[in-house]
Image (cartoon, rainbow, N blue to C red):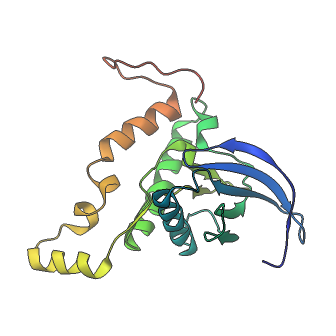
Amino acid sequence: MTWRILNLRPLRSGGNGDLFIGQRSDTGQQVVVKYLRESHLVHARKAFAREVRVLKRRARGMVPLLHADTETDRPYYVMPYLRGGSLSRYAGNLSDIQLHSIAKELALILAGLHAAYVEHGDVKPDNVLASDDGHLQVADPWAMELAAQSCFRRITAARRDIGLRRFVPEARFHKLATSIRMAQRFTNYQPVGSRRTVSGSI
């Protein structure tokens, strides 16, 4: 990396890491640095390295990866700071047209990931960010890289069109749960008969 990160300060903590915001020394661009919190755990380091590998694929709709080091004592990676923030901040304030647009763009992003044999694994409004130009970018992929050759061999052997639904949980088994969860967070609406309540904030 030919540039440094200046004015680094805490932003927030996520599920597996701590986020800091700073500026690039060469361009002044605001960036976010994600540090692995439990860097002493082997399985956590492996999962973090897998996350970086997925980001390095630069799939359409994934947050851009600017730099990463998974071998250092405290693994980290750097991504742009997106001023639009996560979709959680817009819960309850989106029109039907906006919701339709979000659903369509998110579906295209996930379709691209699945076509590249990658499962995001944690699709939720907190992990869907709005870029400066208003488009969506998905972050924090607790991803599973699927074996393309093995996938095709199984499909061919089965002689039926099952696609990636058999191999990607978010495209099949978690489809309903993900849809309900995102609908609740976008609209702040809780279905009748639910045992849980939804607060006004996300």
Location of residue 168 with respect to 122 vertically, above or below = below
Horizontal and vertical percent for residue 70? 61, 69
Determine the residue located farthest toward the front in the rendered image.
40
Horizontal and vertical percent for residue 131? 68, 56
Query: On the image, which quarter does residue 33 sit in?
Result: bottom right
Q: Residue at x 30, y 55 (%)?
A: 169
Image quadrant in which the N terminus is located: bottom right
Q: Nearer the viewer, residue 34 or 105?
A: 34
Residue 77 appears in the figure: yes
Q: Residue at x 38, y 72 (%)?
A: 115
Q: Is residue 57 left or right of residue 134?
A: left
Location of residue 27 with respect to 134 vertically, above or below = below
Query: On the image, which quarter does residue 118 sit in?
Result: bottom left
Q: Nearer the viewer, residue 84 or 6?
A: 6
Residue 59 appears in the figure: no
Query: On the image, which quarter does residue 161 sit in?
Result: bottom left
Q: Is residue 129 left or right of residue 150?
A: right
Q: Nearer the viewer, residue 162 or 146?
A: 146
Location of residue 114 with respect to 127 vertically, above or below = below
Horizontal and vertical percent for residue 172? 27, 53
The number of numbered badges drawn on the structure is 0
Image quadrant in which the C terminus is located: top right
Horizontal and vertical percent for residue 68? 66, 70
Q: Is residue 112 left or right of residue 26?
A: left
Q: Nearer the viewer, residue 6 or 139?
A: 6
Q: Is residue 78 left or right of residue 99?
A: right
